[in-house]
Image (cartoon, helix red, strand yellow):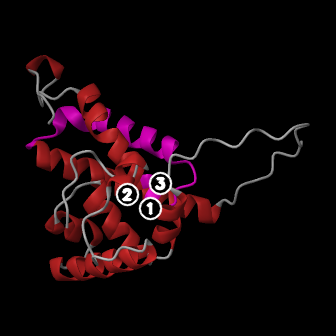
């Protein structure tokens, strides 16, 4: 997964490789949590990763948990900031409207995710976008493993129903990968 190189600092990890490996999953997690400027938050997260990586000790799984713990805290901070400081209108209105950006997220999937509770959405994002194990999600969210499993089960049932799946709750479909909401190596439920 993430190669290590002794010349890359005391921890032996290359920050650029960590970014290449985890940035898309972290961005998907930020998007799934409704962050207003997810790219900016990902930038803040990886600035902290670069700063603190030389002191990090652990294997690839521990690194992934550490990065998503940082992401979780930055996302919570961003959400709190957006509540305290509502967006201000810039004042001047442009002569022409900008063309709408190409949306990489499947609108049907986004609607289905929007129907989940915030807790269900967070568990689904951490399990399938961040590809974290149940125990890591439980520790990160302050829940017991059984509660995480129950939230995940109810969320997958709701998604399957909303997306019209006949087979019931299953692992996320390839549409999640193409929508940028699932890391390439994510495991199923």
Is 185 situated above or below 143?
Answer: above
Q: Quadrant of residue 59?
A: top left
First of labels 3, 2 by sequence position: 3
The image position of residue 109, as x and y in percent, is 47, 63
- Callout 2–callout 1 Cβ contact below 8 Å: yes
Residue 152 visible (yes or no): yes
Is 28 situated above or below 6?
Answer: below
Label 2, label 1: how many angstroms apart (C-alpha)?
5 Å
Depth check: 64 or 168 in front? 168
| Closer to viewer: mark 3 or mark 1 | 3
The image position of residue 21, as x and y in percent, is 26, 36
- Residue extending farthest top: 7
Is 173 situated above or below 62?
Answer: below
How packed is label 1: few (under 14 Cα within 10 Å), some, or many (20 or more)?
A: some
Q: Residue at x 47, y 46 (%)?
A: 41
Depth check: 48 or 113 in front? 113
Is 171 situated above or below 35?
Answer: below
Q: In the rendering, which numbered label is found on residue 76?
A: 1
Q: In the rendering, which numbered label is found on residue 89?
A: none
Give the quadrant of the C terminus. Answer: bottom left
Task: Label 3, secondary structure: give it.
Answer: helix
Q: In the rendering, which numbered label is found on residue 31?
A: 3
The image position of residue 28, as x and y in percent, is 40, 50
Q: In the rendering, which numbered label is found on residue 73?
A: 2
First of labels 3, 1 by sequence position: 3
Point out the stretch of residues depicted in magenta.
30-59
Label 3, label 2: how many angstroms apart (C-alpha)?
15 Å
Q: Quadrant of residue 122?
A: bottom left
The answer to if 33 sits in the magenta stretch is yes
Query: What secondary structure do most residues of the magenta stretch adopt?
Result: helix
């Amino acid at each position: 997964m993430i190669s290590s190189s002794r010349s890359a600092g005391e921890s032996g990890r290359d920050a650029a490789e960590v970014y290449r490996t985890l940035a898309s999953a972290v961005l998907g997690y930020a998007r799934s949590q409704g962050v207003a400027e997810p790219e900016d938050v990902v930038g803040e997260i990886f600035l902290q990763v670069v700063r603190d990586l030389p002191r990090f000790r652990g294997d690839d799984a521990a690194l992934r948990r550490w990065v998503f713990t940082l992401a979780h805290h930055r996302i919570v901070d961003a959400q709190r900031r957006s509540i305290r400081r509502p967006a201000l209108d810039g004042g001047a209105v442009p002569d022409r409207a900008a063309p709408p950006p190409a949306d990489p997220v499947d609108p049907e999937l986004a609607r289905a995710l929007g129907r989940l509770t915030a807790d269900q959405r967070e568990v689904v994002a951490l399990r399938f976008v961040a590809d974290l194990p149940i125990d890591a999600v439980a520790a990160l969210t302050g829940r017991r493993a059984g509660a995480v499993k129950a939230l995940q089960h109810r969320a997958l049932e709701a998604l399957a129903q909303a997306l019209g799946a006949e087979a019931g709750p299953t692992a996320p479909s390839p549409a999640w990968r193409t929508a940028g909401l699932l890391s390439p190596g994510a495991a199923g439920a």
